Each structure stands twice: as structure tokens, then as C-alpha cells.
Amino acid sequence: MNMLQSLFLKHRTWLLVAVVAAVFGWPVEAEQQADPPRWLLGKAYHIPSEFTNQESGYFSIIEGKNGRLYIGTAKYGVNAYLVEFNPVNGVMQMVVDVHRAIMSMLRGFGAQAKIHTRNNVGQLTGKIYFGSKQGYPEKGEKLTDYPGGYVLTYDPKTGKTENLGMPLKQAGVISVTPDEERGLCYISTCDDGRPIEKSHFMILDLKTKKYRDLGDTGISYAFIVVDHQGRAYHPVRNGKIARYDPKSDKLDILDITVDGQPPPLALTKDGTEKGAGHGAVLNWDWSPDRKTLWCVEMSTNQLFSFDLAATSAKIPGKTHGPLMASVKATDCRAMCVDNKGKVWMALSHSVSGIGPRAHLVSYTPGAKAPRDHGPIGVANPDYITLKDEKGKPRPWHHTLRKEKDGTYTPWQPLGIAAGADGSVNVLTLAPFTLFRFAPEQLK
């Protein structure tokens, strides 16, 4: 049994929230309806429905070095695709067919149903790194029907896709972070297990194409970052962090602090977790100098940072105030850091009598608190037709709502990517939509 498995095998009581909540919205406490909002109107682009069957994708979005966006889609029981968006002409095209890349014809639960990874860019090559994962078993299907996910790259310069193989049998791929300078790539796997996810922290040697397993971390939706010294970080169940140093080939399991105290974890009387076992370290991104790790946890309405340059035995962290000071609870699953170090978050909160409402929020390091840029609205409502020719609502178009003043607004953001030109791009579900906000809107 490896070192991570032996450390965390006893923590087997965490009930992970069903993935279907990612489609239909996280329940949050309703806030009192305020005055009519001042909308932050983004130009909307519909990801073509042929690449999805439930109008869904996740946080799989990144800007390439060419200024184009690369978005992963989910087509349950069928296939997954990487879509390229050109902001100059507004054109979307499919650039990677996962099944074609891995030469598979499997359908049902055996299909590569999602690209769910936070896409990343190779700093030397400009390649887009991503992975595939399983969908959900239907009646009569077994978990063993899924062979396992793959790690892939797409090179925008040549248009070629490379299949880097399957890290772990019968496990999907939820995170892919390259370190091309050192010839390595870090992967986190997922099995969608209940009540506790099996999530293996793995290393790929980009030269030999061989994988190495550092162990099971017991956490879902993991993100991996690499710091200024080349050390890779992976969240671990119970609010800890695994840090791997390729120079010494050493893996450490580190405690963290938040404002000088142990991380906030909901525990029962016997010391086991009551609810989410990840504490403050869930959705990650790192600063341009790779010395600061920024984090949001889905439902705490709080922004955290951790000092990766610290020399103490524990990684010190601190809070930076609520994401939205005017509300009691938020659902935040989309967070990124731009090339100037500014943190961007797309989130939702519940408005009494209306339901969830999506906002764009930012934080400039050193500021007193995050800034709410306003609720997201659609600048071009004709970008999609919500009803068919018979006047019936189209399926999987239910999270785009018409407000009393006629503004259309989404309520389930899941992905976000900041552009080098100062633009910010947000993915929302059902219909699967890309919202683009120009730099001048965000000053």
C-alpha cells in the first residue's frame, strides 16, 4: 500500500454531492430581492449542440498562446470533443474528437463522455493539455464497462493531436498540468466514487510516456499546480496538500493554516468529516510568479490564498473576505488568475422569488475585498432560440432566464478563463454558452 493510501484509508465517510448538482444548481440560501440590477452584459456564443447532448461542459476552458479559447464538451454515452473558439471572427470549430484520437468505438458508459479537466497550456510548445473521463452509468451498465480516461494534447500550430495514453485503468482524468521545462506532466484521476472519490496523484514522463502513481488522495475535482521551484501540489482529503519535489523525488503531505488557524473543516464528534473533506483547498489557480496559490471552495463565499514560497512546516494561508459581501451564501465553481495576477470568479447566489443569479467577481491582490462586477446578462439574446418551431421549450435550455426587465441571464456558471488582452470568458450550462466580457467593461 502506498504512502497516501495508508494515510487516508481510514477516512471513508465523506458523502460527495451528486454530480447531477453540477447541472441543476447547488442549493444556496435565498437572499432578499434588491433593486433592479445593473447588468454586466456579455456577448454570448453558443457551443454547437452537435458536440453535446445535454448542453453541458464543465470548467474545461483555457486561452492558448494564439489568443483562441479551447473548450471541452460532454456528450454522455457518445464521445467528447475539444472545441476552438476564435474571438476575432466568433467562429467555433471542433479540433479534437477524443474517440478518433484514441481509436475507440465504445458507447454507453464505456464512452469517453467528458472533457472535464481544467485545460492547461504547455509553456514551451503552446500545446493544449487535457484529459477525458467517464459519464454516468445507465440501467444495466456496470462501472467496469469504462476502460479508463486518456491524457491528450492538441497543438494549435500543427493541428495535430497526441494521445499520451491511459494513466490508470477504469479511472477518468480530472486534472492535467504540464511542466514541459522539466519534461513532466502531473495528472489527477477520478472514479466518481461514492461516498469517497479515489483520486490518484500521478506523474507522466513526457519523454518515456510512462506513468507513476504517487497514491490515492481521496478528494474529488482536484486541481494541480506547479510552483516557482518546480514542485507540484495536489489537494488531499482532510484539508491537506501533497507536494512532490522532482529534484529530490520526495512526496510530502503538508498541513495548512488559514489566518493562523487550522483549516475550516466540518467534523463530527468522533473526528470524521461531516460533509466536504477538502476544507479551503478545492478550486485552485496560481499566480503568474507561481508563488501564491489562490483557492475558492464551492459554498463558503470566501477567497483564500496560500504562500507557496513559505519555508514553514505548514503552508500558511489567509482569507480575503467574502466573494459577495451582500449575500449569505454563494456557489462558486469557476475561478482563474489572469496574467497580471488578478483573480476572477464566476458564481451564483439565490435571489428570493427569482432563483439563482450569476455574477462576475474579481479580486486584485492587496485590495480590502473582492469586487462584484454585477450580475451577468446576455448582450445579444438572439444568439440562440430557446423554443422550437412549435413553440415548445428546447431540451436542456433551462438555465437561461428572462428577467422582468427583459434581460436574459444565465444562472449556472462553471468555467472561466482570462485572456491576455484583459477579456474574461465564462462558461454556463444549458444551453452550453460562452460569455465574453471585453476589457473596457471590467475597469
Image (cartoon, rainbow, N blue to C red):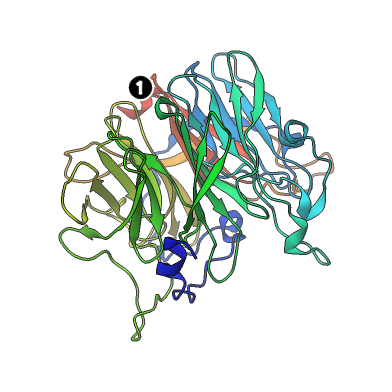
Residue appearing at x 55%, y 51% in the figure: 189
In the image, residue 240 above or below residue 229? below
The front one of 125 and 361 is: 125
Secondary structure beneath label 1: helix
Q: Is residue 407 visible?
A: no
x and y percent of residue 329 in the render?
A: 37, 61
Residue for badge 1:
440
Q: Is residue 163 left or right of residue 105?
A: left
Which amino acid type is marked by label 1? Glu
The front one of 14 and 432 is: 14
Q: Quadrant of residue 143?
A: bottom right
Count the numbered circles shown: 1
Residue appearing at x 45%, y 60% in the figure: 217
Q: Is residue 291 left or right of residue 388?
A: left
* Furthest residue in direction bottom, as rendered: 269
x and y percent of residue 430 in the render?
A: 64, 46
Residue appearing at x 22%, y 50% in the figure: 320
The front one of 60 and 388 is: 60
In the image, residue 221 above or below residue 389? below
Q: Is residue 327 left or right of residue 283?
A: left
Q: Quadrant of the C terminus?
A: top left
The front one of 213 and 170 is: 213
In the image, residue 132 above or below residue 260? above
x and y percent of residue 278 in the render?
A: 39, 62
Residue appearing at x 26%, y 40% in the figure: 292
x and y percent of residue 271 in the render?
A: 34, 80
Q: Quadrant of residue 104?
A: top right
